[in-house]
Amino acid sequence: MKHILIVEDELKLARLQVDYLHNSGFDTNCLSNGLEVLPWLKANPTDLILLDLMLPGRDGLDICREIRSFSAVPIIIITARIEEIDRLLGLELGADDYICKPFSPREMVARVKAVLRRQQAQTTIPILTSALMLNPHNFRVLAEGQEVELTTVEFQLLQALYQQPGRIFSRSKLMDLIYQDHRIVSDRTIDSHIKKLRKKLTDLLPGQELIHSVYGAGYRYDPQDKVVD
Ligand code: CA
């Protein structure tokens, strides 16, 4: 469950925020004094902050700046004046979004979800070790969650290589695996299928080469060696 910190000194508004966020499956905590925010953040895991600007104790702008000096936690700034948003953008506070009062609580929940989704996407891509998922039962291939549209031959080639990472397959070995009816096809046929397959993969995984050509020998699949050769 995601923990949202609500910093708001209008108690009626804070309660409304709590209600809507709870109904959407979030856990919440509320603070009403600006001085409480930093100590609270340092002691409690927080996934997102809804930060009102005009607060007793300490100004929201100050709080935002200080949070950014030690944390990348998503911050949505809540301001009472729409014309202030331009000025806030100019200050480059590092906030993830801005909401103007009065706001619909539904809209607030939608913004919270959008910011969390964006942050999730940014943090999950670099830690994926295997970018490719191949399912031999339904012939589907996913590259970082996106479907790769492959022909049957491309799928078979990828499957052969993928199942034995690091092994070099000669063109004739690949032909045997794919054309089990011993059809006579040229080396070029394999090359052209591999070329199309690689293009489809790099379109979805830019900068990563999973299938490597080994000069004079054939091809190998290597998810560890992602450098484009
Ligand atoms: Ca206020």
Image: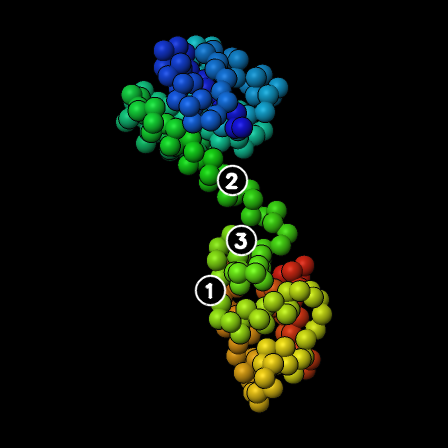
Residue at image x 51%, y 52%? 145
Based on the displayed image, in which of its 4 quarters is residue 90 positioned? top left
Q: Position of residue 142 (x, y in %)?
A: 53, 57
Q: Nearer the viewer, residue 17 or 158?
A: 158
Q: Nearer the viewer, residue 71 or 122?
A: 122
Query: SS at mark 1?
Result: loop
Query: SS at mark 3?
Result: loop
Decide which of tag 2 and tag 1 comes sooner along the chain: 2
Q: Amino acid at mark 1?
A: Glu
Q: Are the residues tagged 2 and 3 within 8 Å (C-beta)?
A: no
Decide which of tag 2 and tag 3 comes sooner along the chain: 2
Query: SS at mark 2?
Result: helix
Q: Quickly name the residue at label 3.
A: 144
Residue at image x 66%, y 70%? 220
Residue at image x 45%, y 17%? 7
Q: Quickly name the residue at label 2.
A: 120
170 to the left or right of 36: right
In the image, residue 88 sits, relative to residue 154, either above or below, namely above
Please tell me how crowded label 3 is: few (under 14), some (14-19), or many (20+) other residues with Cα within 10 Å.
Answer: some
Q: Quickly name the residue at label 1.
A: 149
Residue at image x 57%, y 87%? 183
The quadrant of the rendering that contains the C terminus is: bottom right
Q: Amino acid at mark 2?
A: Gln
**Which color scheme does this rendered protein use?**
rainbow
Q: Amino acid at mark 3?
A: Glu
Whether residue 15 can be seen here: yes
61 to the left or right of 197: left
Disc 2/disc 1 C-alpha distance (Å): 25 Å
Disc 2/disc 3 C-alpha distance (Å): 13 Å
